[in-house]
Structures are given as C-alpha cells and as structure tokens.
Amino acid sequence: MLAYLKTEANTGPDWPGEPMFILEPNHGLPQETLDTLTRSGRIVEFIDSPASRVDQLRSVLLTAAARHWLDKGPMLVLLCDPAAVDAPALLAEVKQNPDLVRHGEANSGVWFLFGTTIVGNPNFTTFFRNMQPGMDDIHIAPSLDIMREHLT
C-alpha cells in the first residue's frame, strides 16, 4: 500500500497495492479532482491539522484499518513531497527485508516504510491504537524502535 499527501502539484510513485490519498485541512482541491482521486484509490481527509507527522501516521493507519483498507504488502507512507523520495529503491529494499521498519525526512516532511512481515503482524494496528495520540515528532525514532522490538 502507498499512502501519500496529495496536492494539485504532485503525483505518487509506482507502488504495489491501491493508493491512499491523504488530504490535509484546507487542501482546496476542486470536486472534480476529488472525484478522480476517489476512482483511483482511497481518501483520508483531515479536518484539523494533526499534532505531528507521527500523529498523522497514527490516524491514517487506524482509519485504514477500521475501513479494512490495509493489505498485507509492503507499506510506504509519504508525509512529504512524493517526488523527494526514491520509491523504487525503497521498494527494492523492503522486498529484500520484509521485517523492515524505517523512516526518513524529505522536503519538510517524513516518510515511513514497513515490510510485509510488519504489516502482516496481527499487532501492527494494535501498536498504533495503543500509541498515545498527539505525540510530537521527537517520538518517531523511539516509537519505531519499540515497534521493531515487538513486531519482528
């Protein structure tokens, strides 16, 4: 699955599974564009700004889980400009290592990569459900370390 921020100026990379478009508050996309996105994938629209990118990740994944949108393939979540991430290299890396849990920074945002073993773990969504809402981004690395410890 690929989940990424959508604006009029960007398109997402090629990734297995159905895309999920993340719309931030006041995105300003016209209805025609929203209709096109709906035909192309799933939409998660934020009404209020999230406290942080890790909080946004939590909300996206819990929404996807509640709506039964999560598949068992590798997952790339781009909370940054999709053009700033080398998705083919990340896909090759995650195919080599299904236990992968990674994140990085790119163009005023972050990205998260989860391997198939992690996404397929029955405790994957439980991990995010139990995560404290409203966490700051300084908690990204420690949270992913805990995830690695418990899900691999």
Image: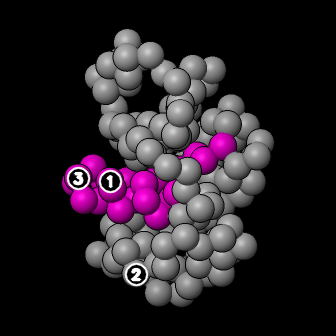
Indicate the amino acid at tag 1. Ala
* Mark 3, other Cα within 10 Å: few <14 / some 14–19 / many ≥20: few
Position of residue 94 relative to residue 40, above or below, is: below
List the residue tagged with mark 2. Answer: 130
Give residue 113's quadrant in the image: bottom right
* Mark 1, other Cα within 10 Å: few <14 / some 14–19 / many ≥20: some
Give residue 120's quadrant in the image: bottom left
Q: In this view, does 24 lie to the left or right of 71?
A: right
Instruction: Report x, y in % for residue 50.
Output: 55, 56
Indicate the amino acid at tag 3. Arg
The residue nearer to you, when weighing 82 against 100, is 82
Viewer can see residue 126: yes
Q: Which mark, residue 67?
A: 3
Residue 61 drawn in magenta:
yes
Give residue 96's quadrant in the image: bottom right
Name the residue at the top extreme: 32
Question: Pointers 3 and 1 in contact (CB under 8 A)?
Answer: yes
Indicate the amino acid at tag 2. Asn
Label 2: which secondary element: helix
Residue 141 drawn in magenta:
no
Find the distance from the CA under tag 3 to the CA under tag 1: 5 Å
* Mark 2, other Cα within 10 Å: few <14 / some 14–19 / many ≥20: few
List the residue tagged with mark 1. Answer: 64
The stretch in magenta equals 56-80
Find the distance from the CA under tag 1 to the CA under tag 2: 16 Å
Sequence-wise, the earlier of marks 2 and 3 is 3
Position of residue 24 relative to residue 6, above or below, is: below
Instruction: Report x, y in % for residue 43.
Output: 36, 37
